[in-house]
Amino acid sequence: MMQFSDSHCHLDDSAFTEQLPLLLAQCQQLAINRIIVPTIAPNKFTEVLNLAKEYHSNPIKIYPCLGIHPWFLQALDNDHLAQLSALVDKSRHEIVAIGEIGLDGAIAKNAPTHGQTTEENWAHQQHFFDYQLNLAKQQNLPVIVHHRQSHDKIMPFLRRYKLAKAGVIHGFSGSYQQAMSYIDLGFKLGIGSTITYSRAKKTINTVKRLPLESLVIETDAPSMPLSKEVLSNAISPYSESTTQGVKQGAENVTLPVNSPVNLIKIFEVLVTIRAESAEQIAQQLERNIAQLFFT
C-alpha cells in the first residue's frame, strides 16, 4: 500500500484544535503516516513540541520543527533568537528541521505602512534568516524555507552556508532555472496546492521536468487551499476509494477548507503531471522525506 507524508502542515493552528483526533484518524485511513509541523513564531515553540509529545503513540507521527517566519518579526529581537537557539539545543533529538524561516519581498514592500522602511525591513528579515541558517548548520539540521518575491535574495545565503542536509523550499512556484539552482544545492522542492490551479502553467511545466528525487508534497494546511475544481472532483479511482471512507467518518464535522487529508488530492494532481506511475511517485516521495528528515 502506498504511504504519504505531509512535509509542511501547521497542525498546531487553532482551526484544527477541536477536531485533531478525528483528523488524524482520517489521515490514517488515507495512509498519511507522517506530518511535519513547522513553527512560525516563539509563542508557538512549546505548543508544537507538546503536540508531538501528546500524540507520540498515535499511528500518525507528528514531527516538530522550530523556526521564526518572516511574517512575524515585527516585535522580535535578538533575545528571541537566543530563545530559539537554546530550545533547539535542548530539543535537538525531538525536532527534524529549523523552520519555517525565509525572506518575503511583499512584507518588505509593505513595511512603510508599519512604520519601518523597506530597507530596514529587509535588513531585519535577513538578520533573522542568517542567524537561523547558521543555527541549522551548527546543529546539522535541514531548513524549511519560505519565499515570496525573494529568490534572488535567498540564494546567496544558501550558497554561503551550503547546509549538509539542505532542506525544503516550501511552496515552490518558481521557474525551472530557479528550481535547479535550489536542487544543485541539495534542496527538495515543496509541491502543494499551486499545481491544482490550471492557470499555474509555469509551475506545472516546471514540476513536470524536475527530477522526482527533488520533490516532496505538502498541504501548508490550513493555509494555501486547493482549487475548487480539484476539491470537488475525484481525480482517479484511488481518490474515490480513499476519500469515501473519510466522508463517512466525518459526518456533522466541520474542518478547514484545507487540511492534511488534501495531501492525497495534491498527490494525484502530481501523478497527472508526471510520467511515472502513482506507485513509483509515492515510493520516491517517501524516500525523499526519509533522506531529508530521518537520516
Image (spheres, rainbow, N blue to C red):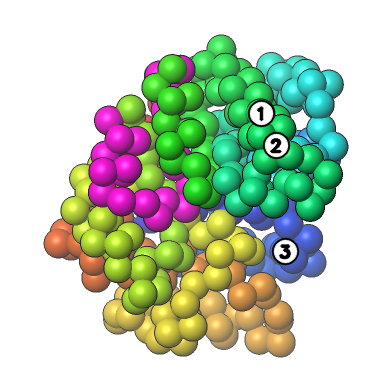
Whichever of callouts 3 and 1 sits on the residue coming sooner in the sequence is 3
Instruction: Judge by depth and name the residue closer to the eye, 194 or 267.
Output: 194
Note whether 203 is above or below 37 in the view shown: below
Task: Tell me the residue that label 1 is attached to.
Answer: 123
Mark 1 near mark 2, Cβ–Cβ under 8 Å?
yes
Residue 97, percent from left and from top? 55, 31
Quadrant, the N terminus: bottom left
Q: Is residue 258 magenta?
A: no
Question: Which element is circle 1 on?
Answer: helix
The residue mark sitting in front, 3 or 1, is 1
Could you tell me residue 66's position as x and y percent? 66, 33
Q: Viewer-proximal residue, 217 or 240?
A: 217
| Amino acid identity at mark 3 | Phe
Residue 16 has which mark? 3
| 19 left or right, relative to 206 | right
Q: Give the alpha-carbon distance from disc 2 to disc 3, as whole Å.
A: 32 Å
What's the magenta region? 161-184
Horizontal and vertical percent position of residue 233: 40, 86
Decide if residue 160 is on the left or right side of residue 18: left
In the picture of the structure, the residue carrying the numbered disc 2 is: 121
Residue type at numbered disc 1: Ala
How many other residues sit within 10 Å of disc 3, few (<14), some (14-19) or many (≥20)? some
**Label 3 SS:** helix
Residue 40's disc number: none
